Structures are given as structure tokens and as C-alpha cells.
């Protein structure tokens, strides 16, 4: 346990950030699973744009590495393109 005030505050801050980051990662995983389960190309296209926004925001806020977000976006785009063709 922290012994001084600044360490106690740092612990509180990291707890809040950890919960917030978990929510963001969980939301990305949920949206990804829903997108991969879709059969309609139009629905998948709109879901993909929302997921792109969430991935970009997570990468910008250092919740996930930028290259990991780019890799997921590329794989999702390949999946959606396979639905259209």
C-alpha cells in the first residue's frame, strides 16, 4: 500500500484509468465480434466505420499500440471486402 499522499493519489488515478481502458478494450472486442458475425455487406460497412473510430481513438489515447490498431483495421477491411465480392 502507498505510504504518502502522492502515491495514494497515483493509485486512485491508475485504478480509474485501468477501468476506463478495460471498458474501451471490451467495447472494441464486442464490436469486432459483431462485425465478424455479420453477413450483410452494407451492415458490415457501417459497423466497420464505427469500429475504425473506436480503434483510432484507442490508439491515440495509448490504450493500444497504433500498429496493433492498424493491423486490426486491415484484417477487418479484408473481411468486409470478402463479403462484398
Image (cartoon, helix red, strand yellow):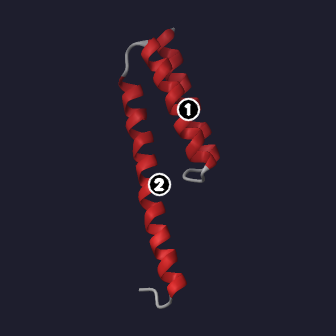
Q: How far from the left and from the top, in percent, is residue 59?
A: 60, 46
Marks 2 & 1, CB-CB < 8 Å contact: no
Give the mark count.
Answer: 2
Report the residue that reaches farthest toward the top. 85
Q: Is residue 54 above or below residue 41?
A: below
Q: Which residue is mark 1?
A: 52
Asked which quadrant contains residue 19, the reply is: bottom left
- Going 38% across and 33% down the picture, which residue do you hit? 33
Instruction: Tell me the number on the disc at residue 69.
Output: none
Earlier residue among tags 2 and 1 = 2
Question: Up-down: is 84 above or below 77?
Answer: above
Disc 2 on helix, strand or loop? helix
Q: Residues within 10 Å of mark 1 (few under 14, many from 20)?
A: some
Where residue 29 sits: x, y (%)?
Answer: 41, 40
Q: Residue 50: give x, y in percent of width and height.
A: 50, 29
27 versus 9 height, above or below = above
Q: Residues within 10 Å of mark 2 (few under 14, many from 20)?
A: some
Residue shown at the point (57%, 32%) measured from the top left = 73
Q: Disc 2 marks which residue?
A: 21
The picture quadrant where one finds residue 1 is bottom left
Secondary element under disc 1, as helix, strand or loop, is helix
Taking the view exactly as shown, the residue that stands out farthest to the bottom is 3
Q: At 45% across and 55% down in the image, what residue appears?
A: 20
Q: CA distance from mark 2 to mark 1?
A: 17 Å
8 to 69, vertically: above or below: below
Where residue 71 appears, as percent x and y from the top left, is 59, 38
In the figure, is residue 45 to the left or right of 30?
Answer: right
Amino acid at each position: 500500500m502507498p505510504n504518502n499522499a502522492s502515491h495514494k493519489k497515483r493509485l486512485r488515478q491508475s485504478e480509474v484509468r485501468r477501468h476506463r481502458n478495460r471498458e474501451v478494450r471490451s467495447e472494441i472486442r464486442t464490436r469486432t465480434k459483431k462485425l465478424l458475425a455479420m453477413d450483410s455487406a452494407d451492415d458490415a460497412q457501417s459497423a466497420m466505420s464505427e469500429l475504425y473510430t473506436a480503434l483510432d481513438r484507442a490508439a491515440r489515447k495509448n490504450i493500444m499500440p497504433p500498429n496493433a490498431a492498424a493491423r486490426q483495421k486491415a484484417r477487418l477491411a479484408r473481411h468486409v471486402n470478402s463479403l462484398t465480392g
